[in-house]
């Protein structure tokens, strides 16, 4: 039988073969794209100061190259903000030193930051991060009339009548305080030129990165430990879990004032307390969205708590429905009031000893002073922070349980003192 040489069949076979090859190649490319989609894309860093003739850059590239490298990567350098714009001042300016033929501030003050960031500095000056932070350790002695007036305008300034130097810091002594309390509380330290605060405690020099300042690890420098474990609480909360498992995908460099759930699908410290998000505008007043004075022994509502609540809920509503938010606030209010009741009981126990002159006037000179202090300052506050930030382990075992334990210790200590005095 004669073999067929049909040209149409040969063409059809060729076309099918070519299509099979193309399909195979397409599948390979799709698989590669899917498997590599999570890998970071390497981008080449641009040294903005590479060709700079600025005398500060030329000198410090040799003297402190790390600082120049950091600044060369910053948006401030890209915006042509020169070293002199922040550091250089006139001769005799408070806190300045002569340097390389001019006069500089080794660390620029907020008076210099105000040149470009007037709104942010004004908001900071009304916040807990301002003078109240500093005065909590150092007291008000030596403050000018202007600074005292500023302090008394701040909600936390009007709240606490006791403005004396922190008793624990005084007992520890200056050699320790610089590494302990002051390391955080100096965020609100007044400068020699009369301005307040140290922006660089959050905005690390000299890169001034949006990503860095927005990440919760930045807040971890101060908001950690038994008396204010907000970072640990955040880490175990649903918001923190989302950040630690998916945060690498979030838009950390998004333009301020434009943030949405597309950029940040879950909350961070900055989203809740500072950043503009949803209908809530950005603010460097970190107390502007808070309902309660949670740091206090016995918490009370803030003067503008209703407006503050509205601002915070303007953030919450971007992800949660109003029924959920209302139920949460109602439950958290009740939990805060319950902690207040337990602290009041400790006050009554401690107060009875004072009334009967069974305690000295000296602070922290016997174990009962520490037990009483830790009950509200460590455990009471941790319970409240855990409630509001949704960290159940901290609300319970690092908080409420420890409050109950300290109450039992206080009762026993007080009963012993009363018995010894014949007042049982």
Image: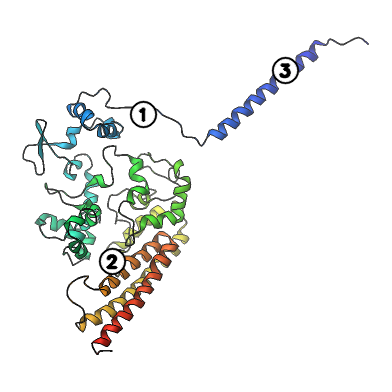
Horizontal side of 222 relative to 25 (left or right) equals left
Of labels 3 and 1, earlier in sequence is: 3
Local crowd size for mark 2, using a 10 Å CA cut-off: few (<14), some (14–19), many (≥20): some
Residue 320: image x %, image y %? Answer: 46, 55
Q: Which residue is mark 2?
A: 296
Q: Residue furthest left?
A: 92
Residue 130: image x %, image y %? Answer: 22, 53
Residue 345: image x %, image y %? Answer: 32, 78
Q: Nearer the viewer, residue 102 or 81?
A: 102
Q: Is residue 329 visible?
A: no
Q: CA distance from mark 1 to mark 2?
A: 47 Å
Say the numbered circle drawn on residue 60. Answer: none
Horizontal side of 254 relative to 48 (left or right) equals right
Against 80, residue 5 (above or below) is above
Q: Nearer the viewer, residue 210 or 60?
A: 60
Against 259, residue 273 (above or below) is below
Regarding mark 3 in the picture, which secondary structure is present there?
Answer: helix
Q: Is residue 383 visible?
A: yes
Local crowd size for mark 1, using a 10 Å CA cut-off: few (<14), some (14–19), many (≥20): few
Q: Which residue is mark 1?
A: 45
Q: Closer to the observer: label 1 or label 2?
A: 1
Say the numbered circle drawn on residue 15. Answer: 3
Q: Closer to the observer: label 3 or label 2?
A: 2
Q: Residue furthest right?
A: 1
Regarding mark 1 in the picture, which secondary structure is present there?
Answer: loop
Horizontal side of 118 relative to 215 (left or right) equals left
Q: CA distance from mark 3 to mark 1?
A: 47 Å
Q: Give the residue displayed 23% in from the left and 55% down from the top.
A: 185
Do the numbered discs 3 and 2 sit on residues whose CB atoms are within 8 Å? no
Q: CA distance from mark 3 to mark 2?
A: 80 Å
Residue 371: image x %, image y %? Answer: 30, 72
């Amino acid at each position: 039988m004669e073999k067929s040489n049909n040209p149409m069949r040969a063409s059809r076979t060729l076309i099918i073969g070519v299509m099979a090859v193309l399909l195979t190649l397409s599948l390979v490319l799709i698989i590669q794209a899917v498997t590599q989609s999570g890998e970071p894309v390497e981008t080449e860093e641009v040294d903005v100061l590479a060709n700079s003739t600025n005398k500060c850059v030329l000198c410090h590239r040799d003297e402190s190259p790390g600082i120049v490298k950091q600044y060369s990567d910053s948006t401030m350098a890209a915006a042509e903000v020169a070293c002199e714009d922040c550091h250089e001042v006139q001769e005799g300016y408070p806190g300045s030193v002569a340097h390389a033929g001019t006069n500089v501030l080794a660390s620029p003050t907020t008076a210099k930051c105000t040149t470009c960031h007037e709104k942010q500095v004004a908001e900071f000056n009304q916040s807990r991060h301002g003078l109240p932070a500093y005065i909590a350790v150092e007291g008000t002695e030596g403050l000018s009339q202007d600074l005292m007036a500023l302090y008394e305008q701040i909600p936390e300034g009007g709240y606490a009548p006791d403005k004396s130097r922190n008793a624990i810091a005084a007992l520890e002594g200056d050699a320790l305080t610089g590494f302990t309390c002051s390391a955080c509380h100096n965020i609100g330290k007044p400068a020699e030129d009369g301005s307040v605060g140290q922006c660089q405690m959050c905005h690390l020099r000299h890169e001034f990165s949006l990503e860095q300042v927005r990440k919760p690890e930045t807040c971890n420098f101060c908001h950690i430990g038994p008396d204010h474990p907000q970072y640990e609480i955040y880490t175990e909360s649903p918001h923190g879990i989302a950040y630690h498992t998916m945060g690498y995908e979030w838009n950390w460099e998004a333009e301020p004032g434009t943030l949405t759930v597309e950029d940040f699908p879950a909350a961070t410290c900055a989203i809740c307390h500072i950043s503009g998000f949803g209908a809530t505008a950005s603010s460097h007043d970190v107390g502007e969205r808070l309902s309660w004075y949670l740091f206090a022994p016995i918490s009370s509502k803030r003067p503008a708590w209703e407006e503050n609540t509205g601002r915070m809920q303007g953030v919450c509503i971007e992800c949660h429905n109003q029924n959920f938010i209302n139920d949460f606030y109602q439950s958290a209010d009740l939990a805060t009031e319950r902690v207040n009741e337990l602290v009041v009981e400790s006050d009554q126990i401690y107060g009875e000893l004072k009334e009967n002159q069974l305690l000295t006037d000296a602070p922290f000179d016997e174990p009962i002073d520490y037990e009483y202090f830790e009950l509200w300052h460590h455990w009471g506050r941790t319970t409240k922070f855990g409630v509001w930030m949704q960290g159940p382990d901290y609300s319970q075992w690092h908080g409420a349980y420890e409050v109950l334990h300290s109450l039992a210790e206080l009762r026993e200590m007080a009963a012993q003192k009363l018995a010894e005095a014949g007042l049982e």
